[in-house]
Image (cartoon, rainbow, N blue to C red):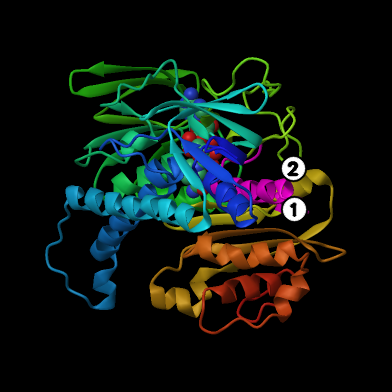
Amino acid sequence: MTENQFDVVVIGGGPAGYPAAIRAAQLGLRTACVDAWVAPDGSRPFGGTCLNVGCIPSKALLESSELYHRAQSEFAAHGIEAGSLSFDVGKMLERKRSIVKQLTSGIEALFKGAGVTPIHGRARLEAGNRVEVDGPDGKRTLEATHVVLATGSTPIELPVAKFDGERIVDSSGALEFTEVPKRLGVIGAGVIGLELGSVWRRLGAEVVLLEALDTFLYMADQQVATEALKQFKRQGLDIRLGAKVTGAERRGDAVSVRYEQGGKAEEIEVDKLIVCVGRRPYTDGLLGPNTGVELDERGFIRVDDHCRTSARNVWAVGDVVRGPMLAHKGTEEGVMVAELIAGHVAEVNYRTIPSIIYTAPEIAWVGQTEEQVKASGRKYKTGVFPFSINGRAKALQQTVGFVKIIADREYDDILGVHIIGPMAGELIAEAVVAMEFSASAEDLQRIIHAHPTLSEALHEAALAADKRAIHALNR
Ligand code: NAD
């Protein structure tokens, strides 16, 4: 083989692409991973949106702002006198960048260890599984037996509120504010809007979220969504539902945002505006003529259950294909595809993909919501257990929220688990394992949960589904 011939070429080095490349190399396939990312400092990191401007940096800032907030509002209850508190946004940003740097350079090290060839540049798939790469060292053509497309997604731009990179920004821009905006507007009270709105609210911004839908967190269990709305409002997030944005214009150093709510025209003025109304699959310039790769009506690359595209030996994984735009979903698809290419049997269980919103309280779920189960006509039971009577939650001073389990009324299999509360994103892992192994509520009831832990709330919720919780009244 020449240096341009590979068994597998992965286009895109985000959380779907880079694990696909590593797994393919582990399985003995000669593999390259091509990525076009250029960071503001001119470096060319792997890791995609997730590591560079998404999951990781947002969690870094969420942690910093949450620590500040807790020091302000909770230390006194612990008998801790912290004196006057202050924060330095610059240091928070530095810490965030350092975490990103460590993780992105880690991928290069992993590639080296596994034997993946990293290639920097913009790749384009041509007919016959050739991949043209235009990079810092010029152009080259790769020949691949298999190509995996993992080019991810990009923020949707609203025609009525176009990004200007300064005052009207996308989620990446909102992770780079060098000072706390006094008045922050957010269009879209979805996952990004709530996470980034929380960061800047905790640091003192007045935050208004304009959400087009009348239903808050439509994709979540509505019992959880109701509790979340109550808590976020209590934190001072001004969430306006049924608010349809009709325009946003710069006015000097401010942005004026016009919207309609309940048939009335409204207007607010903010210092910064984050537009986070969803993401679209990113395929710009990716496909040459006659590749045979089809897109669906929404622009996603069309794939089957095993991520095969309509072209022979071309696969697609992650945000660029149907399904939830979640890093871990893309990762599992990438690994599955590498294994299928190597001749193994592999599957992704799309029914047990957990979702997490990293607000405080955190929100996490797996499986169906109560609304979905009800609509399916299945007979079900629910068990709910509040953190307010969980010993560990009390010790942590984090007693807001609950765990809710939905199980089949007759067969007892777990259909969905929904958590709002401390460490929900970690706790949901147990529910995912349970559902992956087709556990019943009784299985969870009989599993020993250490005391005192937050996980006891999950145990008690399973017990509550059969009205046998020990630490609740089972009404
Ligand atoms: P989203 O789909 O979660 O939320 C977008 C919100 O914007 C929706 O509630 C929608 O109703 C609203 N909206 C759309 N058009 C509007 C308009 N014109 N005016 C007002 N509201 C409008 O999308 P997002 O928050 O942008 O996130 C993008 C993707 O990234 C999602 O798929 C999300 O799951 C993923 N993501 C996940 C995480 C995580 O797992 N914690 C974090 C960040 C992003």
In x, y percent, where is residue 118? 46, 43
Q: Is residue 269 above or below residue 28?
A: above
Residue farthest toward the front in the current orientation of the protein: 2
Q: Is residue 98 left or right of residue 243?
A: left
Of the 4 image quadrants, the one containing the C terminus is: bottom right
Q: Does the magenta stretch include residue 338?
A: yes
Residue in view at x 36 percent, y 36 percent: 172
Q: Give the range drawn in magenta.
A: 322-351
Residue in view at x 22 percent, y 42 percent: 180
* Residue type (three-letter) at the residue carrying disc 1: Ala
Quickly name the residue at label 2: 306
Mark number, residue 161 = none
In x, y percent, where is residue 241? 49, 33
**Label 2 CA crowd tier, 10 Å (few <14, some 14–19, many 20+):** some
In x, y percent, where is residue 473? 65, 76
* Residue type (three-letter) at the residue carrying disc 2: His
Residue in view at x 40 percent, y 55 percent: 106
Q: Is mark 1 on a helix, strand or loop?
A: loop
Q: Does the magenta stretch include residue 62?
A: no
Residue 462: tell me if it is visible: yes
Counting residues from the start of the chain, the first of labels 2 and 1 encountered is 2
Quickly name the residue at label 1: 346
Of the 4 image quadrants, the one containing the N terminus is: top right
Q: Is residue 397 left or right of residue 214?
A: left
Q: In this view, does 315 lie to the left or right of 188?
A: right
Residue in view at x 47 percent, y 78 percent: 392
Q: How many labels does the image show?
A: 2
